[in-house]
Amino acid sequence: MTVIDLDLHQNTEKASTPPALQLDGVRHSYGRTVAVDGVSVSVAPGEVVCLLGPSGCGKTTMLRIAAGLEALQDGEIRLAGTMVAGPGVDVPPERRGVGLVFQDYALFPHLDVLDNVAFGLTGWTAADRRSRAESVLALVGMNDYAAAFPHELSGGQQQRVALARALAPRPRVMLLDEPYSGLDARLRDRVRDEVLHILKASGSACLMVTHDSEEAMFMADRIAVMRAGRIVQEGTPVELYCEPVDAFVASFFGEVNRIEGVVHAGAVDTPIGNIPARGLPDGAPATVVVRPEAVTIQSWSSVFSDDPSGLVEQARLLGRTSLIHMTVTAPARPDRSVHLHARVPGVHLPKPGVRVRIQVDHAQTFVFAGG
Ligand code: ATP
């Protein structure tokens, strides 16, 4: 992993200070392919911002442009308020103090861990370089490996060394590109937890790229969801999860149930009940998006025969939750049914063929225009 370090010490963290990193109106094409189509995003000092989106939406291109590894075609880039790329300005990557955190670590194979970490500390005395490299290795829990070479380390260890190398010059901005994708699930959880704590303790601003929504929610103060070269929605993880602007954003934060319908008298009539469709005109086609965790199930009884009921098809334990597949039928309308997933906490595994009562939390149910 190569690391982008932007060693900009001049800004303080007062409210009036400019963003540590600011990309304004960035457009970028590769031949006829428009990779980034007018994106603006900024990262405040000490803030972690994630660019989240599916493969090919332009995330990595944004990072490479921020780093100066890709020549800016249109827009402006500022670091701590100073333009580094824009009309008539193009500060080369090495003068931005920039390096990318790639998934493949890219440690120098011929240098031991200590020298890898000390490598970027140019202009320091030998004693200061050693002492800084040792203390930052201790920060990532790798001080016992100072004399080891990269090929003697596991993927996660290499990742931590790369992180130490990035942090050593006390960067104001870090750019991370899918930094955990080479790690298995358990190691990834541990390393990203460490990285988050280290970033927050160091006060570095961080722009990180990922296609994994859970990772973005874990790491980010703010998330910008990208699609086809544009930002579709930007906000805190809570805003994006609880108030998605469209079905694409809603579905990016975990599997969802979709029910197509038509708005009638301010609501969409579905097998799971009438779902309010605020702001949509009568007759408009609409998509109802229901998070599986919005669906609760209870034992069915004829007392509740006015409520929607579901016929269990499958139930699977996924660990902390159980996923129940059902066919849900509208009350008194056996001709109207929908396949629905419910995600319930703990071990809850009703048998196939059992009828259950369905309730839906409208706070986790969204209605969007269009079928
Ligand atoms: P992934 O998550 O798969 O890395 P991404 O969101 O980071 O994807 P980019 O790598 O920025 O997306 O690519 C955006 C678009 O630009 C894609 O259509 C990609 O094929 C194209 N692209 C990226 N790099 C180049 C290149 N060097 N030459 C030509 N096209 C490119």
Image (cartoon, rainbow, N blue to C red):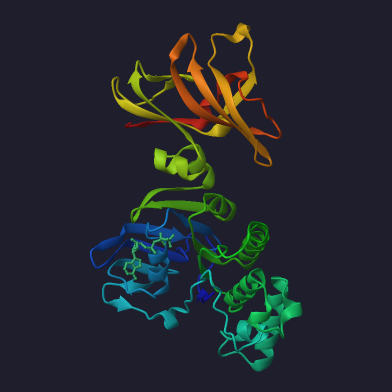
Residue 338 in the figure: left or right of residue 158: left
Residue at x-position 66% and y-position 59%: 193
Res 51 quadrant in image: bottom left
Residue 169 in the figure: left or right of residue 141: left
Give the image location of residue 20, x and y in percent: 47, 66
Res 157 quadrant in image: bottom right
Res 260 quadrant in image: top left
Q: For this rendering, which residue is in front, 26 or 177?
A: 177
Residue 179 in the figure: left or right of residue 84: right
Give the image location of residue 169, x and y in percent: 58, 79
Query: Vertical placement of 332 versus 322: above or below?
Result: above
Residue at x-position 37% and y-position 56%: 57
Query: Vertical placement of 111 versus 33: above or below?
Result: below
Query: Vertical placement of 336 versus 39: above or below?
Result: above
Q: In which quadrant will I find the N terminus?
A: bottom right
Residue 1 in the figure: left or right of residue 247: right
